[in-house]
Structures are given as structure tokens and as C-alpha cells.
């Protein structure tokens, strides 16, 4: 299994380098950019995971918000420690998204997409109506323990690497193949005895676990969250990362997040507008580079199963 | 009783705007099978042009109704120009590609957010009254401006409904929505019909924007609110269905009005969302959707 060893080597090198970088960086600004990149990459990878089965999960913003609020509430009101609050926030989000998915995944394509969009906006209204969650002005004082303060960047990057590895393993497993089969033709998948509905709900739930943890990390890094942080724009930005990086590659969302977050920090420094940059990047990517940066610059990194499926189909 | 009539009148006014908005969304989806998020910005650009031109024209010595008509023409023209541009440089290449076209439309939305904000500024603006006076029906008060809005909106909806059933273009639009390959086989020029459908939908959104500008507070982000409600209306009614869009718009308007009166407008939006979930449980493709 030479291929497998190569994959492990890539992950070890890439993940190790990212964690090392987060530990050696001492400049607080660069550290904050790096943590933002890691969280953005997580959200984008979560979005891409649902795209494997051919659905666009625009409720991503809502679930990242649920994770952030769950982590924040547990930490500030119930004084659950940071180390426990983070996975619990992920679990809470996973359960909530399974319920949401069980209802909405009966619908497909445009309906699922639009329900996610309206859900995101409805959930924001709910936050602003609950005084325990800080209402419109949001929650403040979500601090990680003081002893971990210096290590936050490292913790965020390490958590991201672990979760990304989980998503990667899921994509390469039989379950990942089922998702691709659902995307290609759901009826064929069902005809060979796959419970496609259940698989879709599970996939949604896994992806939203990651989104929930990413939301929780966001809450602890920023220490302040408000309903405005989790508008549908969050999902739109995540889509930009996926699309610009290359949606056919597992590394795509990660590359997209790193490039676009770096670019937007540079543009804001020059007085530009974030929306304009992201919008322009999506349009250019979709019209000129349909397979993203990775697709345009050759076969960098491991190709996903999906591209292999496509290549095989073309060869036939 | 007076309550009920007043609430009914308000629901009718809000519903009229939602109808114009959701008819455009459902038309574009039916003909091109794309979900057009830019629709809200086409609406917003018309409203913004009217709101910024109107006070200047009135100051320049025009009578209010003349100034309003001129400003509306400019607003609708700007919106149609934007629509044509977006179609030619974007959606033309992404017809019947749901994910691709959606991603592209999100790109346009983000970009236009930036453009509108820098062109028109973030501040909200008021517009002078155009048709003064109020009408009293059985004790309920309706301003003339809103009555005008309703009349035009319902007239447009009626014209569209009639045109879809009786004109050659309307029949072609319906044929393409039903089965575009079969339509092409019998000689319907799909590309041209799709472009016309997109323009008609953009015109409806622009008209809604121009009508709404004098009676509401216009800001560059106004489109998103209406976009959400418009999408909810078409989900309830069924994407691609014209009667469904009208039905859904009324549903949303009624809940918003009644909920907003007895509770609070934000609870009304939660109620609307709950309604969508309930509808999806029983009709996964909307009440009148064919899918």
C-alpha cells in the first residue's frame, strides 16, 4: 500500500507544519490570521463534505452559530470547561442538524438549499429574542482558561487538522463512495440496497459536527459572538473558499481559505471591501477556473475519489 | 371588524409586493432551472435609483407625480441593464446547472453588495410623498400611495397570468418550463426565450422596487429581506408554479401581518419559517409544485 503510506506522509508533513507554524508565530496579528484561516478551512471543508452528495448546505451558517452559542452558553452560564465545551458544542450541533436534515433532506436540490437559507435567518432572529443568549447585542466573555491563552493558536490549528483528517477518512471510506453514488444517481444507489435517506442525514450530521466545533472555536477565539456573525454570508464565504480552491480536491477548501483570508486581510489593509473581493473571486473562479486554483495549477496533492470517478467515466 | 379589515388591507399591500417578487423568482426557476439570488439586488437597485433621483427631480422643479414616473423609468432601466449584463456574462453559461448558477449568483450578490454600498452609501433615505391623502374603507385607513402600489402590482400579476396563457411568448415560456428539449424540438428558440424570461422577471422585481421606494425606507441591504420572503413564498407554493407563487405570497403576507400585529415582527418571521417546515413535511415539493 504505497499510496496509503504517501497519504499518511502528506498529512503528517502538512498537519505538522501547520501546527508548528502556529506555535512559532509570536506576532499576535499573524496568529489571529492563522486561526481565522484554520476556522474558515473547517467551515469550507464541512460545506464541501455535503457537496459530495450533491447538496449545498446553506444552513452551515446556522449550525456554526449553534455551535458557537452552545459553547458560549456552556462556558459562561454553566461554567463547563473549555476542553469539554468544545466537543459538546459539536455534538449538540450534530444532533440539531440530524433533526433538521431528517425533515429537509426529504426535499432535494433547490428546496434544500433555500430552506437552509431561510433557516439561517430564522435562527438569527431566535438568538436575538433570547435574553439568556444576550439578545441582539450577543454574548460576551467567552474565555478559554488563562493557562491555555498562549497556546490558543496551536489548539485551534491542531483541532482543525484532526477534524479535517476525520472528514478525509470519511470521504475515502465506503461511506464516502456511497455519498458520491447518491450524487451521481440516487435511484441507482437505492436500487442496490443503500438507505440513501439515512446516509444523507448521517453525512449532514457529520459535516455539521465539524461546523459546530468550528463555531465553538470562533466563540473562544473572539470571546464575543453576536447574531450578526452568523448570517448567510458565512456560508457564502465558505462557498467562495471551496470554489476558489477547487471543489474536486480535498485540499481545495483549505487552499481557498488560506488564499482568500490572506488576500482579504491584505485588501482590508489597503482600504478595500471584503464583499467585493469575495464576490469577484467567486465570479472569476466560476467563469475562468471552474476547477479552482488546484485544478488550474495541475495535480497538486492527492486527487479525490470523485475526480477519479470522473476520469474513469470519461475514459469509458 | 375594523381590525380585521385593517389587517386584511395591510396583508394585501405586503402581499402585492411579495407577489411581484416571487413571480420573478418562480419564472426564472421554471425557465432556466436556476436559483437567482441576485433578484434581491435587481429590486434594490431600482428602489435605490428612485429614492436618490426623486428628491433631486422634485427640487429641480418637477411636479411630484411626473418626477416619480421619470425616476421609476430610470430605476427600471438601470435594473434591466444590470439584469441583461448578469445574464450575458454569467447565467447564460449556467442554465440548468443548479449548483454552478447558484454559486455564480452568490458571487454577484457579494460583489453588488460592495458596489451598491459604495455608490449609494450606507445611509437610509426618505422620499417625498407622491400621492397624498388616505382612503377610508369601513373605518380602515389606507394611504393613496399604498393603494396605487396594490393596484399596479395586481394589474401586473393579472397581465402576466393572462400573457402566460394566451400569448405566443407566454406559451413558449410555459413549454420551456415544462420540458425544454421537447420545446426546442418543436422550434422554440430556447436561448432567446430564456433571456426574455430573465428580463421579464427582472422587470417585475424592478417594478416592485420602484413601487416600494416611496412607501418604505430604502437602504442598499433592502433586497435581502424581500428575497427571503420571496423564496419562502415560492417554496410554499412550489418552485416554478405561478399560482403557487401568488398563493405563497399571500400566505406569507397574512402571517407576517397578523403575527406582527398580535406579537412582534420577529416572532412573525419565526412563525413563517415554522410554516415552511410544516409545508415541507407534507408536500416536499411545495403545495402546487410539480418538481
Image: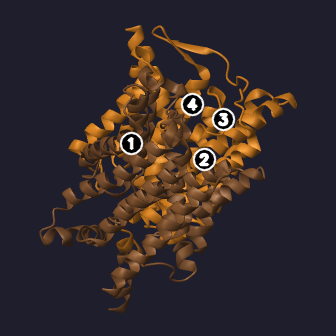
Chain colours: A brown, B orange
Answer with mark 2 or mark 4, whichever residue precedes in sequence.
Answer: 2
CB under 8 Å between callouts 2 and 4?
A: no
Query: Label 1: chain?
Result: A
SS at circle 4: helix
Separation (CA) of disc 4 from disc 3: 19 Å
Cα separation, mark 2 vs mark 4, equals 20 Å
Q: CA distance from mark 3 to mark 2?
A: 11 Å
Q: Above or below — where is B161 with respect to A198?
A: above
Residue where numbered disc 4 is placed:
B149
Read off the residue under disc 2: B41
Circle 4: is it few (<14), some (14-19), or many (20+) Cα within 10 Å?
Answer: many
* Label 2 Cα crowd, 10 Å radius (few <14 / some 14-19 / many 20+): many
Q: Is residue A138 above or below residue B243?
A: above
Q: Quadrant of the N terminus of chain A?
A: bottom left
* In-image side of A131 versus A262 (left or right): left
Between A66 and B211, the residue placed more toward the observer is A66
Asked if badges 1 and 3 are on one and the same chain, I answer no
| Chain of the residue that carries numbered disc 2 in the rendered image | B
Residue assigned mark 3: B219
Amino acid at each position: 500500500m504505497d499510496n496509503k503510506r504517501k497519504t499518511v506522509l502528506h498529512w503528517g508533513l502538512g498537519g505538522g507544519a501547520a501546527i508548528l507554524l502556529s506555535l512559532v508565530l509570536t506576532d499576535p496579528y499573524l496568529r489571529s490570521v492563522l486561526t481565522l484561516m484554520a476556522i474558515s478551512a473547517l467551515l469550507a471543508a464541512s460545506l464541501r463534505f455535503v457537496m459530495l452528495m450533491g447538496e449545498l448546505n446553506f444552513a452551515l451558517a446556522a449550525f456554526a452559530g449553534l455551535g458557537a452559542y452552545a459553547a458560549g452558553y456552556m462556558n459562561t452560564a454553566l461554567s463547563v470547561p473549555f476542553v469539554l465545551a468544545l466537543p459538546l458544542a459539536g455534538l449538540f450541533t450534530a444532533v440539531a442538524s440530524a433533526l433538521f436534515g431528517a425533515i429537509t433532506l426529504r426535499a432535494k436540490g433547490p428546496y434544500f438549499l433555500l430552506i437552509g437559507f431561510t433557516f439561517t435567518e430564522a435562527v438569527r432572529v431566535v438568538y436575538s429574542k433570547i435574553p439568556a443568549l444576550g439578545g441582539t447585542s450577543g454574548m460576551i466573555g467567552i474565555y478559554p482558561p488563562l493557562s491555555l491563552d498562549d497556546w490558543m493558536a496551536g489548539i485551534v490549528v491542531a483541532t482543525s487538522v484532526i477534524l479535517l483528517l476525520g472528514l478525509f477518512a470519511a470521504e475515502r471510506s465506503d461511506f464516502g463512495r456511497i455519498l458520491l453514488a447518491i450524487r451521481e444517481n440516487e435511484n441507482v444507489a437505492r436500487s442496490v440496497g443503500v438507505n440513501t435517506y439515512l446516509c444523507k442525514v448521517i453525512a449532514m450530521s457529520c459535516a455539521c459536527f465539524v461546523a459546530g466545533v468550528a463555531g465553538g472555536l470562533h466563540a473562544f477565539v473572539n470571546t464575543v459572538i453576536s447574531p450578526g456573525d452568523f448570517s448567510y454570508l458565512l456560508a457564502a464565504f465558505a462557498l467562495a473558499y471551496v470554489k476558489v480552491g477547487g471543489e474536486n480536491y480535498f485540499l481545495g477548501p483549505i487552499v481557498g481559505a488560506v488564499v482568500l483570508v490572506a488576500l482579504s486581510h491584505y485588501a482590508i489593509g489597503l482600504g478595500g471591501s471584503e464583499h467585493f473581493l469575495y464576490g469577484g473571486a467567486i465570479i472569476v473562479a466560476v467563469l475562468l477556473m471552474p476547477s479552482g486554483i488546484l485544478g488550474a495549477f495541475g495535480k497538486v496533492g492527492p486527487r479525490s475519489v470523485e475526480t477519479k470517478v470522473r476520469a474513469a467515466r470519461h475514459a469509458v | 371588524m375594523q381590525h380585521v379589515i385593517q389587517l386584511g388591507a395591510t396583508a394585501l399591500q405586503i402581499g402585492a409586493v411579495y407577489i411581484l417578487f416571487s413571480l420573478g423568482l418562480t419564472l426564472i426557476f421554471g425557465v432556466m432551472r436556476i436559483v437567482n439570488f441576485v433578484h434581491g439586488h435587481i429590486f434594490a437597485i431600482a428602489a435605490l435609483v428612485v429614492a436618490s433621483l426623486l428628491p433631486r427631480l422634485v427640487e429641480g422643479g418637477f411636479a411630484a407625480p411626473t418626477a416619480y414616473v421619470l425616476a421609476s423609468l430610470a430605476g427600471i432601466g438601470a435594473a434591466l441593464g444590470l439584469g441583461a449584463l448578469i445574464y450575458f456574462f454569467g447565467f447564460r453559461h449556467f442554465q440548468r446547472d443548479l449548483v454552478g448558477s447558484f454559486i455564480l449568483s452568490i458571487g454577484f450578490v457579494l460583489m453588488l453588495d460592495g458596489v451598491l454600498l459604495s455608490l449609494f452609501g450606507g445611509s437610509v433615505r426618505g422620499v417625498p410623498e407622491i400621492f397624498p391623502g388616505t382612503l377610508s374603507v369601513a373605518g380602515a385607513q389606507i394611504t393613496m400611495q399604498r393603494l396605487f402600489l396594490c393596484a399596479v402590482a395586481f394589474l401586473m400579476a393579472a397581465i402576466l397570468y393572462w400573457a402566460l396563457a394566451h400569448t405566443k411568448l407566454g406559451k413558449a415560456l410555459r413549454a420551456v418550463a415544462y420540458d425544454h428539449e421537447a420545446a426546442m424540438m418543436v422550434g422554440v428558440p430556447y436561448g432567446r426565450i430564456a433571456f426574455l424570461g430573465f428580463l421579464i422577471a427582472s422587470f417585475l422585481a424592478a417594478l416592485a422596487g420602484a413601487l416600494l421606494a416611496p412607501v418604505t425606507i430604502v437602504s442598499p441591504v433592502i433586497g435581502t429581506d424581500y428575497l427571503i420572503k420571496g423564496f419562502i413564498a415560492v417554496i410554499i407554493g412550489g418552485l416554478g408554479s405561478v399560482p403557487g407563487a401568488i398563493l405563497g405570497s399571500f400566505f406569507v403576507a397574512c402571517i407576517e401581518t397578523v403575527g406582527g400585529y398580535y406579537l412582534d415582527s420577529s416572532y412573525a418571521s419565526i412563525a413563517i419559517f415554522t410554516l415552511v417546515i410544516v409545508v415541507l413535511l407534507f408536500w416536499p415539493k411545495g403545495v402546487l409544485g410539480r418538481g
